[in-house]
Structures are given as structure tokens and as C-alpha cells.
Image (cartoon, grey):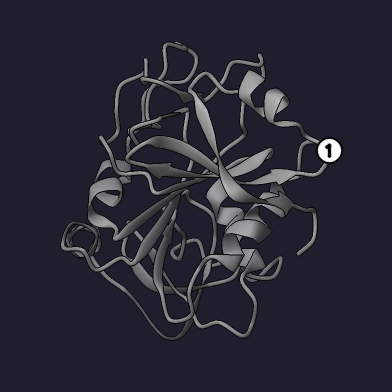
Amino acid sequence: MRLDLRDVARRIARDIPDGAYVNLGIGLPTLVADCVGSDKEVVYHSENGILGMGPAPAPGEEDPELINAGKQPVTLLPGGAFFHHTDAFLMMRGGHVDLTVLGAFQVSEHGDLANWATDDASHPPAVGGAMDLAVGAERVLVMTTHTTKAGEPKLVPRCSYPLTAAGVVDRVYTDLAVIDVTPEGFVVREMVAGLTREDLQGATAARLSFADDVGVLGQRE
């Protein structure tokens, strides 16, 4: 029943408005850039100092001096620019990023985000620019699997991992559902076909509410 993560990225891409200035977090969120249609003009920002990032270069055409925050080679679109990373952080902190898509280890029902540290010693803490993006972006979207590889829920009443920021998440996209964070907690907007409400609640530690018009989260929209 779980969606492929590229299908999750496609669903997120539908919600990115034309003309938006967007920062995509390291890891899963980078898939979203490949799914935004050519009918939209989206300006991508990277906290290491790029505005107007283009797609990944063709094999053999990589420029080792033009990389994103995840150290992946990128291209620069016409009109794009690169600059000191301090200026990139000023853009984030100054509210000049319309939307960010971040990964998560946990999201609480209050919209708290934990995505930089766990209790796993094999994965050292790495906050990067996540704290600045979480509090500076106008809208914060989270892309994640609904549970860990061990089956532990990521949507919880209260985060047990160190917070990146409190009360910042607007919407969560998982391989099982699209869920809004509201003052009343998590509200399910869409679910994958064949999944029951009981199944989804069983994979979620926090209490879920369901919209009156819950849609089907399909593999291709």
C-alpha cells in the first residue's frame, strides 16, 4: 500500500505554487525538483549560497565548484547567482523563502519538527540550515516515510528527539498519507488507496482526525 517516494515527491510538487522561492532539504526532498512541471517557474535556493539552481548536470559535465548544500553537483539557470553562504542564511532568516521541504525523524501533533539528531550513535547530529529554514520559511512542508525501518511511528504526540523548531510544520507528506497540522492536531487530507483509517491510525502514535472529504493519494496524479 505504501507509495514509492518519487510518487510522494510528485504529490508535493503539485502543492508548490508558480513563482515560489523554494529551498529543498538534503535527502528525500531533493526528489521534488525533478517533479515540478515545466508549466511552473520555481526559483530554488540553497543555503550554501545559490539562487536559481537548475537540474543536475549531465554525466561528465559536473562542475566541482557548483554544488548544492548536500554536495551534489547542480547547474545554474539563466539569471541565477551564487554568493557567500552568509547571504543565503540572511535570505532564510529574513523570511525571503516562500516554502521549504524538509525531511524529518519525528513530527509532533503540535507541528514540532525533529530532523537533526537521534539517539543513534552511528548517525552523528547534523543540523545544517534546517533550524533557520524551519523558522524563516513562510511555509514548512515535511517529506518522510510514515514509520521508521523498524516500524516506529514518526508522527507522535510529542517529539522525543531534540527539536529543530517548535510549532513550524504546516503539512506532512508520507508514503501513506497527506496530513495537515492544525490547532486541533493532525488532520488527514489524503490516504493511499486500500488503506483503512484504522490501519493509518495504527501506524501513527498521535491521534488522527480525518477531513470530511478525505481524498485518495494515488501513484500518479
Residue 16 in the image, given as x and y percentages of width and height? 50, 68
Q: Quadrant of residue 37?
A: bottom right
In the image: residue 205, left or right of residue 85: right
Looking at this rendering, what residue extends furthest in the bottom direction?
A: 78
Left or right for 24, reference 198: left
Disc 1 element: loop
- Identify which residue, 179 or 18, lies in the foreground: 179
Q: Residues within 10 Å of mark 1 (few under 14, many from 20)?
A: few
Q: On the image, which quarter does residue 61 sit in?
A: bottom right
Q: Is residue 181 above or below residue 207?
A: below
Q: Residue at x 72, y 24 (%)?
A: 199
Q: Position of residue 42 (x, y in %)?
A: 48, 76
Q: How many marks?
A: 1
Which residue is at a point 52% across and 18% down the rendered structure image? Answer: 205
Whether 130 is drawn above or below 202: the answer is below
Q: Nearer the viewer, residue 13 or 217?
A: 217
Which residue, given by chain and number where applicable, does mark 1 sit on? Answer: 194
Find residue 32 and report its horizontal and vertical position in percent: 59, 59
What residue is drawn where x is 80% and y is 54%? 219
Query: In the rendered image, which quarter contains the C terminus?
Result: bottom right
Amino acid bearing label 1 = Gly
Residue 46, image x, y percentages: 38, 61
Q: Residue at x 33, y 67 (%)?
A: 98
In which quadrant is the N terminus drawn? top right
Q: Nearer the viewer, residue 215 or 47?
A: 215
Relative to 144, is 81 above or below?
A: below
Name, please, the residue furthest toward the front.
212
